[in-house]
Image (cartoon, rainbow, N blue to C red):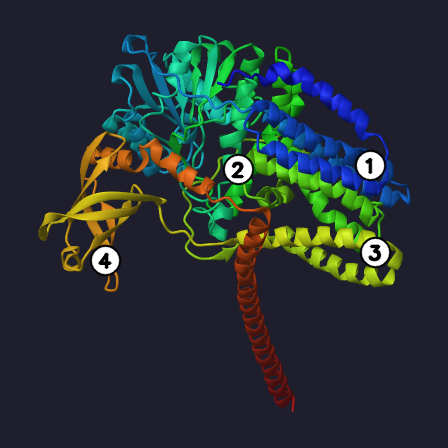
Amino acid sequence: MNTFHAKQLLPIWLVLLLAFVYVAQIEISALAQLWLAVGVFMLMLLVRTQAKKPVWRLVLLSLAAFLTLRYVFWRVNSTISYHDFLSFLAALALFLAEIYGITVYALGMFVNVHPLRRQPVPLPRDSSRWPTVDVLVPSYNEPQDMLEITLLAALAMRYPRDKLRVCLLDDGGTVQKRADSNPAKAAEARQRHDELQALCARIGASYLTRERNLHAKAGNINSALEHLDGELVLILDADHVPTVDLLENTVGSFVEDEKMFLVQTPHFFINPDPVERNLRLFSEMPSENEMFYRVIQHGLDFWNSAFFCGSAAVLRRKFLNEIGGISGQSITEDAETALTLHALGYRSAYIGRPMIAGLQPETYTGFVVQRVRWAQGMVQILLLKNPLLQKGLAPWQRLSYFSSAFFWFFAYARVTFVLAPAMYLILGLQIYDATLLGFLAYALPHVVAAMYVSDFLFGKVRWAFISELYELMQAFYSLPGIARVIKSPTSPSFMVTPKGEQLDSDFISKLSGPFYAILIITIASLLFGVYRYFAYPLDRDVVMITMGWELFNFSILIGALGALYERRQRRAHPRMPAQMTAEICFDAAPGWLPCRVDDLSVGGLNIRVPGATQVGAAASGASLRIHNAALGRMSELPLSTRSSVHDAEENITYLGMAFVTPDDQVKSEVISLVLGDSQRWVNFLQGRSDNRRTILHAYFLLLKVGLRNAIGHGGEITRIGLTYLLRLVQQIVLWLFWRVVVTWVKIRNWALFRDAQS
């Protein structure tokens, strides 16, 4: 660790900020402010060349904070006026959204002032000093094959078997569920209980369940802890497959520091989330979670505030017992547990090496379920256990936890920023009194500096405008969820995130409604803006500013619509790029041939073999000989052929192969090859980090991929419209036919009646 300690300079930073507050409130002309902003920004460019040194990093962040403070004072003193009651309410709502954003921005600078890049502490050479570890895999409704992969990988971790116990915690086969009043549900629970119990017995894991499903995941873990005695507890979600070195890189911290209660590692995902998949950016763009796991957690770690994220983490059992186990007052039991233990004076650590491979929600609906739960849980923590008032926390820990919880109010700010331009352009509400020169002198420098700081802090892990896209895609559903928590802080219940979904066809997400409504409002706003520009010449400055803002909103909305066009996903096991050399031998053509593995999953792989002579032989079985980095030796694995294509121009045969796993030993070896080497995940993340984009490039790329997918909405809506139209025509024809028949019967009966009377 660098000998410079940002904590020691914290008082200096605060003094500088106080000085900035004094300078920031000094009024000067808009033109003078513009030149001042240009000078400060030029100084920021100069300072950034030295910003690897902590002191210059602090200077850079302070200069950006100065421009923001100048903007805030100008905003308060010059842009908020009382015109009428509705305008004032709208102006106040917008101002509060801006203050929220600036607060989160300031807290983010504080948290990330000096990220701690901690290296794993080596385990003692004397293995008798190594603590015992219980590996807990909580499960509710996940499929058996997913659980089997995670359990086999956990059993393959490099750690003495007499000190390691792997446990499946089955909340889907509890006594309560097996005795359900619904016979079908009870039978399903009994079948799950018997099958998973047999699985654990076969592979050497322990099976645990409980009487009743109380307190969701936290209750499941706490119930299991009553039956276990390991000194440390490794918690893994059912879909989080560990690499072989996870315990090697985490347990040493507990041996070195007796007050260490947590070592958290990143959540790394091998499948794209709905936004990445639908926009087809997974292999190119850093994932949404990377900003948190590759930057922010390191910043929190410096302040001894890295918190438990629910999985891929090792905890000291003794300290868990001290607080009665995993906390359960909120539905984000992980962060709540860490907050409680930090308040008792215990320490946490964050090791930034990705050592699990997990699954993200495949559909936008699953994505929303997950994010609304996170938002509600963090707001619960803010309301029920306010970090700013929590006894036992150091001041910097209070700010760190407050930053993590307060962030989730972005839904309010994002919805406000989307609707605000329409308040002026359509409704004529006066929400932002500013001249074009004032905006250029105060607002634009603040925005540019904020984007520059964001690029400095997160440029390798987050493209420009991606945060706005993800926030918008969550906001319309998070905001009602947050409102429910504010109304009743203890009301939310834990909802399991759907995983492993397969999509058979392309379709528009059923949650697209709010985005269509906002798109219509945005287009209407732009049309009204053109009208206002010519109809109200004195307001042209404000109209131009607001229309520019609305055009930005339109661009993000196009990206959101593109992400809402769900792309089909039929693979049960996601494939990750491999680029590994190997040898293949076909049963029908003995002899090892060099080949290259392009990608891998636990289900199969794609291989390229030079030449054409293997096409016929490929129809038979085969064996693959490849270096298994996780096991440190060569693996020879049986394969079957799924597809075979020869490229005559390149003289290469492309083979789609499936692993053949006749027993658990071979299956475990395949899992180690595919998911057991953490260096593969490090290399993959590094490759995405190298794909940095300038702000303009990122903007136009997002617009392009959004438009490409958004066009699919038109075709799908047309198809749905035609389907409904055909159904309507069919119903009309049937109704007319029925009316004709009924009328004919009536006429016929009347005729018969009349004849009978005559």
Counting the numbered discs, the total is: 4
Q: Which residue is mark 1?
A: 74
Q: Are marks 1 and 3 in contact (CB under 8 Å)?
A: no
Q: In the rendered structure, which disc, 4 or 3, sits on the residue that comes first in sequence?
A: 3
Query: Please, what secondary structure does the residue beneath circle 4 have?
Result: strand
Residue beneath the point at 36% across and 49% down:
571
* Mark before the other along the chain sequence, 2 or 1: 1
Residue ID at (41%, 51%) = 569
Amino acid carrying label 3: it is: Arg
Give the residue type that dot 2 points to: Gln
Label 3 – label 2 distance at C-alpha: 43 Å
> Could you tell me the amino acid type at mark 1?
Trp
| Alpha-carbon span between mark 1 and mark 3 | 20 Å
Mark 3 or 2, nearer chain start: 2
Q: Choose the circle earlier in sequence order: 2 or 4.
A: 2
- Spatial CA distance of label 2 from label 4 is 44 Å
- Disc 4: which residue: 652
| Residue 122, label in figure | none
The residue that mark 2 highlights is 370
In percent of width and height, residue 414 lies at: 67, 42
- In the image, residue 400 sits, relative to residue 29, either above or below, namely above
Rendering coords of residue 395 (x, y %):
65, 15
Question: Pointer 3 and pointer 2: residues touching (CB < 8 Å)?
Answer: no
Residue where numbered disc 3 is placed: 540
